[in-house]
Image (cartoon, rainbow, N blue to C red):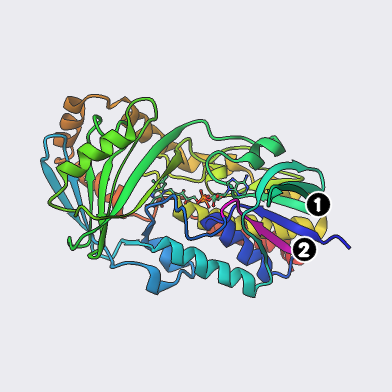
Amino acid sequence: MRKQYDVAIVGAGLAGLQVARVLGARGLRVLLLDRKTSLAAPVYTTGIFVRKTWEDFPLPAEQLGAPIRDVFLYSPSQRRIQLTADHDEFRIGRMQWIYLSMLESCSRAGVHWLPGSRVVQCAPGNIAVARNNKIENLEVRFVIGADGARSIVARQLGLDRNVDFLVGLEVIVASRSQPALHCFLDPRIAPGYIAWVAADGDTAHVGVAGYPGRFNPASALDVFRMRVKHLAGDRVIERRGGMIPVNGILRNIACDRGLLVGDAAGAVSPLTAGGLDGAMRLSSFAADVTAAYLASGDVSILREYDGARFQARFVARRWMRTMLRVCTHPAIAEAVFTAMRTPMLLALARHIFFSRGSFPDLSSDHLMFARNHSANAG
Ligand SMILES: Cc1cc2nc3c(=O)[nH]c(=O)nc-3n(C[C@H](O)[C@H](O)[C@H](O)COP(=O)(O)OP(=O)(O)OC[C@H]3O[C@@H](n4cnc5c(N)ncnc54)[C@H](O)[C@@H]3O)c2cc1C
């Protein structure tokens, strides 16, 4: 007999793993697949977690690096501002181990894991998977697209797709620098975003990101590494990179055949380009919606999973992203930096780095949803 799954989750990044472990724990027949043969490589993220994520979700604490409170901002001419938080605000995750630990929770919850499996088509009631040089068709009632910035599931289900991207590239090097985030505003090496050194006392992630077409990430990274030699060593341990959607959450992210989570849903802060918190939060909500929908078959439940509801909370961040996009000349960046020394803009910078606002807190939506659908979700 062919096995039928309640849910196929396409992509085992943070978003897919989170939704899989919650749905598995609810007793659904869950299939989790990824085109990668191992979750240990490649990794697409720096892995900087903000405090609210490790406070609200069960991440393995031993795989989070030393706490970080200090943020240094640099102008194109290397002028510097230091911001120090009152609490531990950031920790750099050892992502390979975090993914593997979450996968273990998924297995304990009965999730069926299929690595080395690339989804190529989603038809009503089944998905086609390229695996071991063959195409297999698997019967599934519902598909969750956790397949990243350029989601094939979004395309196959006719849902909204990301249109605005940054491209990021980094190396991890051995470094004994004090735990801190160093953020460099310089449109020559990071047009529309920043270059960074994220140090946790053992290693440093040295990276650049910006609008594709406006720079060459590999050469920009070389230039930047020379500039920050005093902060980060030469010995490269790993290289990472990928596309970051910065359009804000998409509107149309669910239909009767499936829904989107994480980068596939655009759940990334358009300003900071942080998506790990959004991946965890939106996936938890998506799991509730999916469980309630599959229990009742009531399509109206899916209307609760509407990106338009969260879009209003992204307005300020989208506006600031536009400011970053038009900051194309080092002289403009230098002027912005000078303005940032005023108390009002310093307070804004502290708010951006240290407040709990990287992704909307969905707990009230969650609570309301659970109240309305508690009978079905059981
Ligand atoms: C260079 C870089 C640095 C970043 N740094 C940070 C940071 O420090 N902090 C932060 O909060 N955010 C950061 N982000 C953003 C953050 O990494 C993402 O928002 C987050 O990882 C998204 O998780 P996800 O699970 O949605 O997608 P992903 O982690 O991209 O996972 C998608 C998975 O789907 C799989 N897949 C894709 N297509 C298919 C298919 N057809 N079939 C099967 N599997 C498929 C992929 O192999 C992949 O494993 C960074 C992004 C980049 C690119």
In the rendered image, the quadrant that contains the C terminus is bottom right
Q: Which residue is mark 2?
A: 376
Instruction: Name the residue rendered at 54%, 45% in the picture.
Output: 148
Residue 33 included in the magenta stretch of the image: yes
Q: Is residue 178 magenta?
A: no
Q: Amino acid at mark 2?
A: Asn
The answer to which quarter of the image holds residue 315 is: top left
Q: Is residue 242 visible?
A: yes
Picture coordinates of residue 301, whole percent (x, y): 73, 51
In this orientation, which residue lies closer to the viewer: 334 or 97? 97
The image position of residue 147, as x and y in percent, is 58, 47
Res 356 → quadrant: bottom left
Q: Which residues are magenta?
A: 29-36
- Specify few, some or many for label 2: CA neighbours under 10 Å numbering under 14, 14-19, or 20 or more: some
The residue lying toward the viewer, choosing from 84 and 62, is: 62
The location of residue 351, given as percent across then percent down, is 29, 50
Q: Is residue 222 left or right of residue 229?
A: right
Residue 343 in sight: no
Q: Which mark is residue 286?
A: none
* Spot occupied by residue 239 in the image (x, y as percentages of width and height): 36, 50
Residue at x 69% of width, y 71% of height: 110
Q: Which residue is mark 1?
A: 298
Task: Kindly state the secondary structure of the residue where label 2 is placed.
Answer: helix
Whether label 1 lies within 8 Å of ligand 1 gets the answer no
Cβ–Cβ under 8 Å for marks 1 and 2: yes
**Quadrant where the N terminus lies?**
bottom right
Tell me the residue at 75%/52% (across/down): 142
Dot 1: element: loop
Of the image marks 1 and 2, the number of the one nearer the N terminus: 1
238 in relation to 74, above or below = below
The Cα–Cα distance between marks 1 and 2, rounded to whole angstroms, is 10 Å
Q: Nearer the viewer, residue 121 or 278?
A: 121
